[in-house]
Image (cartoon, grey):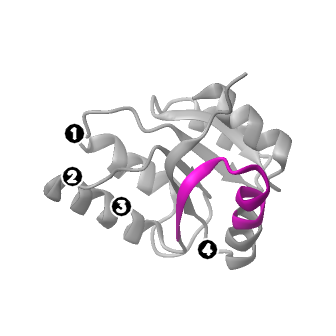
């Protein structure tokens, strides 16, 4: 069976420990060739807009936390949904919130493929890869 891997993953979380641990998991299972991390979802959105304008590489996968300062995950999803991207970028909410309202709200976004409860594990990465 061929190993599934994405080209470029965006990890958007204001917790640098989570970003570090996600990088360690990637070293272990190699789920992506390149990983860009952002502690501010506004910066990630700007990067995507710039990539669209300049015809640069877009992410093949986005993992985003909901609860962040400045621009939270919901606002990011609203803004990303408005962009004319031209390709499907699977987004996975990656949150410590087990609030059913958050889970239900996430299902209203066409771009959100799943809601993953932290912490990230190899099994959860494999589930993500099977989903995309």
- Residue 1 x %, y %: 73, 21
| Residue 52: assigned label | 2
| Above or below 18: residue 110 | above
- Residue at image mark 3: 45
The structure residue drawn at horizontal position 76% and vertical position 49%, both measured from the top left corner, is 29
Whole-Å distance between the Cαs marked 4 and 3? 14 Å
Whole-Å distance between the Cαs marked 2 and 4? 24 Å
- Residue at image mark 1: 84
- Residue at image mark 4: 14
Q: Residue furthest top?
A: 1
Q: Secondary structure at mark 1?
A: loop
Please say if the residues under marks 2 and 1 sit with CB atoms less than 8 Å apart.
yes
Please say if the residues under marks 1 and 3 sit with CB atoms less than 8 Å apart.
no
Circle 2 Cα neighbour tier, 10 Å, few/some/many (<14 / 14–19 / ≥20): some
Q: If you read the primary sequence from the N terminus, does the residue marked by circle 4 or circle 3 appear first?
A: 4
Q: If you read the primary sequence from the N terminus, does the residue marked by circle 1 or circle 3 appear first?
A: 3
Magenta stretch: includes residue 51: no
| Above or below 75: residue 2 | above
Q: If you read the primary sequence from the N terminus, does the residue marked by circle 2 or circle 3 appear first?
A: 3
Q: Which residues are magenta?
A: 23-37
Comparing 89 with 93, the one in front is 89
Whole-Å distance between the Cαs marked 2 and 1? 9 Å
């Amino acid at each position: 069976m061929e190993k599934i891997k994405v080209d470029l993953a965006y990890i958007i979380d204001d917790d640098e420990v989570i970003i570090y641990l996600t990088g360690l998991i990637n070293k272990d299972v190699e789920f992506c060739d390149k990983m860009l991390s952002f502690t501010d979802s506004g910066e990630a959105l700007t990067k995507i807009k710039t990539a669209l304008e300049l015809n640069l590489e877009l992410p093949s996968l986005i993992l985003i936390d909901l609860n962040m300062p400045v621009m939270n995950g919901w606002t990011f999803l609203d803004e990303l949904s408005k962009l004319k991207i031209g390709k499907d970028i699977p987004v996975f909410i990656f949150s410590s919130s087990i609030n059913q309202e958050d889970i239900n709200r996430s299902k209203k976004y066409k771009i959100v493929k799943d809601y993953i409860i932290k912490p990230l594990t190899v099994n959860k990465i494999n589930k993500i890869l099977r989903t995309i």
